[in-house]
Amino acid sequence: MSLELKNVEKKVGIETHIYSTNLKLEKNTINVLLGSTLAGKTTLMQIMAGLDKPTSGEIWFNDENVTGKEVQKRNCSMVYQQFINYPNFTVFENIASPLKITGVKPDEIKERVGKVAELLKLSAMLNKKPDELSGGQQQRTALARALVKDSDLILLDEPLANLDFKLREELREELPKLFEDRDCIVVYATTEPLDALMIGGNTATLLEGRIIQYGETLKVYNKPENLISAKVFSDPPMNIAEISKSGDMFKLKDYNVQWKSDIKIKDGDYKIGIRPHNITTYKEGNNSVEINGKVLISELSGSESLIHFTSGKLNWVSLSNGVQQKNIGENTKLFMNVDEFLYFDANNRLVTNG
Amino acid sequence: MNKTYNQKAWFFVVPVFVLVAFNAVVPLMTVVNYSFQETFGSNVFAWEGTRWFKQILHSERFHASLGRQFIFTFIILLIQLPLGIGIALTMPKKGWGVPVCLILMSMPLLIPWNVVGAMWNIFALPDIGFLGNSLNSLGFDYNFTQQSGDAWFTTILMDVWHWTSLVVLLSYAGLNSIQPAYYQAAEIDGASRWDIFRYIELPKMKKVLTLAILLRFMDSFMIYTEPFVLTGGGPGNATNFLSLDLVKMALGQFDLGPAAAMSLIYFLIVLLICWVFYSLMMKNEGRT
């Protein structure tokens, strides 16, 4: 089982929503579409589901061209950011609805709904109506409706975005388990890099209608092919600075910071990407370099401190553990973990040792 | 908890109170006053107790016009609701068609009621009216001034023309507030067009439809101007609806006592039906 997009393109009027895209999703995988709003995640999912037709290109499912096939005839399910349930059905009827339409016998419906309801902790509210439930429970009902069907393709379009923080955490942990032993392809769209990391599987980074990189989630995170992919997959935003290299010395162009690195690349100009958690108020790693900055703002969350500072002409973001009290305007010393730097060449491609 | 009491705030209510007193309470009390007394003009009153009420409730004339009123309202609702929802469903959701449809739909609502009556009167005249003339030349024996069936047909057609738009506009607003994701989710479930209508659109339109039914019920139950101009209640008493009958009794025959009693009964019927209907429709709402 696989889902393949071949040169899929979507235009609306003169605007291009999806540029020519090739993507192959294998069975039993969870695939995260990661990108900001308007990156084309939802459009891509609607094309996968058959809710929307591509302007050009083909969609293949199991060696079958399904490009023009109607949604009703495909075996997929979708969960939305908004909690979409039938308003005047009970939770049981809601979960049972896709089975009823396909003519499953009442006994079997009861059994399957019962199972899914238990999995999603809905057993106690099967007789309630959606508007009597909390947001989290409503979204669980929508998830149950998607799961009960044994679809080949399950699409989750930012399913956690409208939930409050605690419920989001809870459901995010459960999600990968729900799909563990299912014979299907799961696609999960999100704007949050953290979602992608917690869900694992594969990740495709998207920007403005293009898939920038697709691969195993950790690989995409640790070795982004290019600067754009690295930027998309970084929250808080990645720090980017121009540097020059000569010999084994690296130097920030804008500010007097130098360091040595054993990365073997040609002399010349590069860009570096530094994730915020690799700039800290304390030394981390064997190889760190000092940077002085003026605090712009500091956000404390208790377990972490986010400190924005200026150094030279650039604004930097750093993320340290624990409470690091800094006053606005204060001059402070921070440490950058050199081993974690990502180097990009003039074409914004990642350069590595090997 | 230390609450500050400021009785001066009551002064804010005074203007509304005075206004409501003059435009509602005082006239209503006058009617109540009339309904329990007999008057011969020059402010001479004689106490009659509940006599007028008993008389009206047992009067065949009242039963007949009340019956006509119920049948009329029932037919109107039966036609206008499905038709209005149907038109709303077929209206475009975006593009240049939206303003065109909305303006076309609002037109009948903007025409003064007596003009509507006069328009349809002329339109339906059997000899010179376009509708009447056409029907007759097609071989139908149509004359709304002489045949009760034709009078009913014309009155109902006029009301449908005049008021279906209101149902359309309300339904259209209700339909537009449904998020596209609902339709997509239903399609993914494999739901048919009818399923989508029955299980998504109709429940989501429940509130606006309740409002539409209430408004259409009240307006059609109290209809006066249009049939007054169109048929004047005729031929005979065929289209003599409650409010027409009431005005005839009050101003034609100057039976102020019975007319006042009838007004109150009329008012209570409207109030009762609206209340029962609204309570039934909203029984399961308002829970969170």
Image: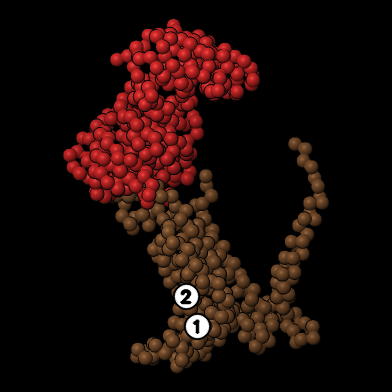
Chain colours: A red, B brown
Q: 10 Å neighbourhood of mark 1: few (<14), some, or many (≥20)?
A: many
Q: Is residue A244 left or right of residue A313?
A: left
Q: In the image, what residue type sits under mark 2?
A: Trp
| CA gap, disc 2 and disc 1 | 10 Å
- Residue A62: x %, y % from top left: 19, 38
SS state under label 2: helix
Say which mark, if any, is on residue B279. none
Q: Which residue is mark 1?
A: B120
Say which label, 2 or 1, has the lower sequence index: 1
B247 and B57: which is toward the camera: B247
Question: How many numbered discs?
Answer: 2
Residue plotted at (43% across, 26% down): A234
- Residue B256: x %, y % from top left: 69, 82
Residue A161 appears in view: yes
A187 up-or-down from B70: above or below: above
Say which mark, if any, is on residue B161. 2
The quadrant the N terminus of chain B occupies is: top right
Q: In the image, what residue type sits under mark 1?
A: Trp
B252 up-or-down from B110: above or below: below
Mark 2 in CB contact with mark 1 (< 8 angstroms): yes
A75 up-or-down from B85: above or below: above
A318 and A124: which is toward the camera: A318
Residue plotted at (64% across, 17% down): A330
SS state under label 1: helix
A148 up-or-down from B207: above or below: above
